[in-house]
Image (spheres, grey):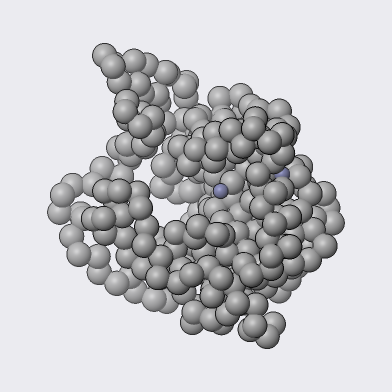
Amino acid sequence: MSELRKDPVTGRWVIISTERGRRPTDFGVQENKAKGGFCPFCPGNEDKTPPEILAFRPEGSPRNGPGWHLRVVPNKFPALRVEGELNREGVGLYDKMSGIGAHEVIIETPNHPETLATIPGQRFEDMLWAYRERMIDLRKDIRLRYAMIFKNHGEAAGATLEHSHSQLIALPIVPHLVVEEMTGAKDYYRYKERCIYCDIVRQEIQQGERVVLENADFIAITPFASFSPFESWILPKRHNSFFEESYIHEIKSLALIFAETLKRLAKALNSPPYNFTLHTTPFNEKNLEYYHWHFEIIPKLTKYAGFEWGSGFFINPTPPEEAANFLRELSP
Ligand SMILES: [Zn+2]
Ligand SMILES: [Zn+2]
Ligand SMILES: [Zn+2]
């Protein structure tokens, strides 16, 4: 079983994954993975993944067979496992706990060559419904504190399989970056009695220079202090701390703006590898007046080296105002 360990200085947790048991020689120069070849996510190969947790398929279409539009399955090589006890333990000054959690894969389309920039609008929306449904289900497990939804698109962004999919890792702790955001947002709230994200939405709409897209319920912006070129955030206009408590019409309008943002990034940057993540409130919190869910999209355009790792300080060669302007002016 894998293990969670806490850095005693920074408070950051890491997952020590014993499952994959890599030896030094396994880390050699990565060969390019063969394109094409066998794909466990394609229809007809359902028996090559663990049995499905959730699937959207027409009525009468049998479970774990073809015919689906979207499938959610457990990761075959999970970073964390659902079974077992959450043993919190101190070893001298160090804290650790067993690697309890969930690691799921959301297969967004049955159609192998499609990407999120090319799939039909309804499929994109289905993906968001699947995220919401899985969050609502996992939050019932009192051992779990957080579900991180993320996507790796393209090999350089960490995707090991070509077939379009996103992932969900549910954790017994709240990730460091989310804690950092929540602390900052809480400090701002204490001082101003306003949600900082609501204020960002208002100010960005007013200024306009970093707005990429806007509809009735959302804005897509390139954030003021983007650490990476073309970094883009999607924020709901309505204050809401939990993504999974979005309204039906909001999911529909999120699908539209999110898909259009990815299409424009694909067009502007020649289908770059990218990651996106969902930042939302931990399961064991109530509705918070100071924290506001959002998606962050990071195209993988630069490499991080010693300076960035050592300082946590990023050098971004593209001002976000220019990135927004460029994306805004692309025709849909
Ligand atoms: Zn496939
Ligand atoms: Zn807010
Ligand atoms: Zn965030």
- State left or right for residue 224 relative to residue 67: left
Q: Residue furthest left?
A: 25
> Which x, y percent locates residue 130?
68, 52
> Which x, y percent locates residue 92?
26, 14
Say which of 177 and 200 sits in front.
Answer: 200
Q: Is residue 79 above or below residue 123?
A: above
Residue at 23%, 47% (x, y): give it. Answer: 22
Q: Is residue 270 above or below residue 208?
A: below
Q: Is residue 168 visible to us here?
A: yes
> Which x, y percent locates residue 132?
70, 47
> Which x, y percent locates residue 28?
18, 60
- State left or right for residue 6 relative to residue 185: left
Q: How many numbered dots are placed on residues in this image?
A: 0
Say which of 296 and 104 sits in front.
Answer: 296
Q: Is residue 247 above or below residue 324?
A: above
Tell me the quarter of the picture where residue 20 sits: top left
- State left or right for residue 154 relative to residue 289: left
Q: Is residue 276 above or below residue 322?
A: above
Say which of 307 and 49 sits in front.
Answer: 307
Tell me the quarter of the picture where residue 291 sits: top right
Residue at 53%, 68% (x, y): give it. Answer: 320
- Screen quadrant of the C terminus: bottom right
Tell me the quarter of the picture where residue 170 sits: top right
Residue at 34%, 74% (x, y): give it. Answer: 34
Residue at 33%, 39% (x, y): give it. Answer: 17
- Screen quadrant of the N terminus: top left
Q: Is residue 155 visible to us here?
A: no
